[in-house]
Image (cartoon, coloured by chain):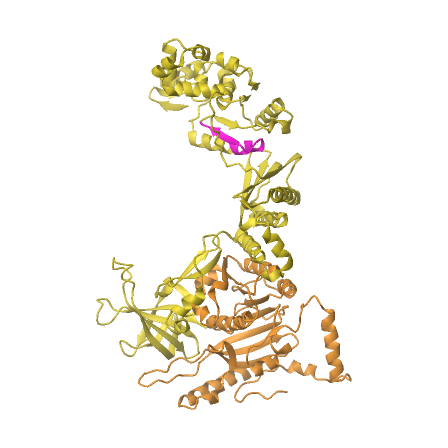
Amino acid sequence: MTASKHGLRISATTEAAEQAGLRLDMPLADARAIYPSLTVETADPENDAAALHRLALWCRRYSPWTTVHAPDGIAIEITGCAHLFGGEIKLLSDLEGRLRAFGLTARLAVAPTIGGAWAAARHAVDSPCVVTSSELRKFLARLPVASLRLDEALIDDLSMVGMKQIHDLLGKPRAPLAARFGPQLLQLLDRALGNEDETFHPLTPASSYYAERRFAEPIFTMTAIERAIARLAQDLADRLVEAGKGARRVELDLFRVDGWVERLTVRTGTLCREADHLSRLFRERLDRIGSEFDAGFGFDVIILSAFDIETFVAAQDVLQADVARTADPRTLARLMDRLINRFGARSVTRFAPQASHIPERAVQPTPLTEKQRNSDWTMHLRSLPDGVQLDRPLLLLSPPEPVTALSEVPDGPPIRFVWNQVAHRVARADGPERISPEWWLHPAGENRRTRDYYRVEDETGRRFWLFRSGLYERDDAEPHWFIHGVFA
Amino acid sequence: MRNEPQGIGSFRSPSSHRYQPASPLADADLQTLRRRIRALSTTDTANPEATVALGDDAIDGALPDRGLTLGAVHEFLPASRDDFAATLGFGFGLLVRLLRSRPGPVLWAAPSREIFRNGAAYPLGLAAFGFDPGRLHYLTVEEAKDVLWSMEEALASGALAGAIGILPAKDKSYDFTASRRLSLRAASSGVTAFLIRHHTSADKPTAAVTRWSIAARQSAPVWRHGLPMPGLGPPRWRANLVRCKRGQPRSWLVEWNHETFSFRMASPLAHRMPAAAGTAITQSADQRRMAS
């Protein structure tokens, strides 16, 4: 039941409730009068929508072209798919049987147009019902105007002038209808009749390169799933090779018998159409999911689809044959694919130089999955002042950690410092190297203290990179010491 | 036996006497036999002679095949908690020498907790070793077993020039079996692996070809007029070769030469200025430590 401005009303019923005489949109008080011991639940439209979405995903087992017709419908484009199930009738009965097994009551219909199927599913007398294109017009004529997906207000307007069935609209001149009820009415009528095309927006983009397997007995052991994936990968790779294409993204849909869909995505850095690489990526992904992977009562349909398709340059194949294994750039790309697949998109980074003299900003780490910046380090190092990299640490702490340091003279190197509760007595020191803030980047005044860097070595030979933040004479606050890195 | 450079402690375990030719076999026969055994065990190393020289005759001469074996696993242990950077520096110096003869990228795998604790590799600092940071693929993972997995895959693929893996404290996943797996893959692809282990890790045998224990030592002071404190000399490490396949444990005091990108013996005689006295004291303290 839901709350409306007319009080609490029934928004959904069970079959038993309907037999007792309860109807949709009935005030709750009336319903209670008819059946005093009625069990009432508050409607939860958000969860209903989520469940419908999940069910629609599961429906992709029949066709990749599947979408949700909110709030209560799912549309599946089965053109070219029905024969896989032995015809439309058989497909419908298969679907009906499975839905009933989930405990769902559904009204099913097949029609040549989206509008026609929408109308047939909601307003046809019997379910499931199949409407052929020759009888579509006749079939629609007998249905109420509400089957045209019209607004409530428009339905009311039509019924006021006595137009209750689609039949009443069919023979009428179009211009007065459009003038009186707006263009929407005629558009929806044309779409239902198939006089105007309607675009189907699938829930997930469908790929023209895919491979699928259906199993009479659901499979649930990891070995069986892996074997199935390997065969699917081979099918898909064959298809891609035949078309001269490669993919950068491949998705695996595992349809569980109980209506859940497990979806795994792998991405590759280069165009891929190698079956063993693909199946290995998926195998490692499954391996990574490990115990969290829930096969439930098993999977009965597995679909592997390729996305981000591009034409494969054939020269790459030829090159690979006569160049040694180390020189093949694809071996590296495959390795990186697998590392990223296992440890996440941001796990592998490369470093690009950046024009900044602030140590933490001089290097730009970029995940391998993102567009790589210019990484010509040779040129960059040449542009730096002579030997500046010799004064840079092997390991950089970010952010710099505060240390307590003691120096003999205000502007001199520290003679002692304590880091991580360990005291170090400084025996050698180089510096200072003064690094001024980039005032043109931080106009707000934050982070605007000059740093004086020292390379120091303690009595045991460990080397550290310390800096004093702030100047004695100029800044108001007392300068602070930080450790920014460790040298070898 | 080779002459040791003056002032350097020599580290030799008593068990090494085993290798003295006490048997009736002549030395030449033994050599032939060794070569035949090596030829038979083809799975161990594809090309056992492929090595990279450290750049110092004394060290290279003590290593089998005059250098660090390529296509194998090498372990580096910090002598103490604070020697991690020194150990990494020594290992990285070796890697840089290896990279000069082998093109291709480098994988650096480290658990995120270790990166947080010790700091992240800083490309400009790596460039100081003569390394092109553009070759680096930096992998951040969660656990030690992820480091080993990625190292194994990296070694098997053969697409790399080398791989560095950092293992955390209390790691149980790296054992003999794991090291053997890494070694076999390294041998088949020729990629060399460097494992930086934790200083607390147990001294158990593994399939690694060498195991080094590295400690930082005070560098040679660089005196400059008018400054209260001497400047830093080239980094100096006490490098203990703890385990070495077909070789014997040794110990050297080495320096990294950032001009030739090679290792050299730290020679106390090179500094005749007042600092020489200070260095000598460090040396003898060092020897005392070795002797105990």
Residue B214 x, y percent position in the rendering: 52, 75
The quadrant of the rendering that contains the N terminus of chain B is bottom right
Q: Which residue is nearer to you in this view: B147 or A37? A: B147
The verdict on residue B89 being magenta is: no
The verdict on residue A61 being magenta is: yes
The answer to whether residue A472 is above or below residue B140 is below
Q: Is residue A413 left or right of residue A103?
A: left
- Which residues lie in the magenta part? A55-70
Chain coloured orange: B
The quarter holding residue B116 reads bottom left
Residue B42 x, y percent position in the rendering: 71, 67
Q: Which residue is nearer to you in this view: A267 or A92? A: A267
In this view, which residue lies farthest toward the right?
Answer: B24
In this view, which residue lies farthest toward the top?
Answer: A162
Q: Which residue is nearer to you in this view: B281 or A240? A: A240
- Residue at point 29%, 61% (across, down): A447
Q: Is residue B180 left or right of residue B24?
A: left
For the image, the number of numbered tags is 0
The quarter holding residue A91 reads top right
The answer to whether residue B45 is above or below residue A108 is below
The quadrant of the rendering that contains the C terminus of chain B is bottom right
Q: In this view, does B234 lie to the left or right of B55?
A: left
Q: Can residue B286 be seen in this view?
A: yes
Task: Please name the color used to draw chain A.
Answer: yellow
Residue B85 x, y percent position in the rendering: 47, 71
Residue B11 x, y percent position in the rendering: 58, 82
The quarter holding residue A263 reads top right
Q: Is residue A297 visible?
A: no
In this view, which residue lies farthest toward the front?
Answer: A315
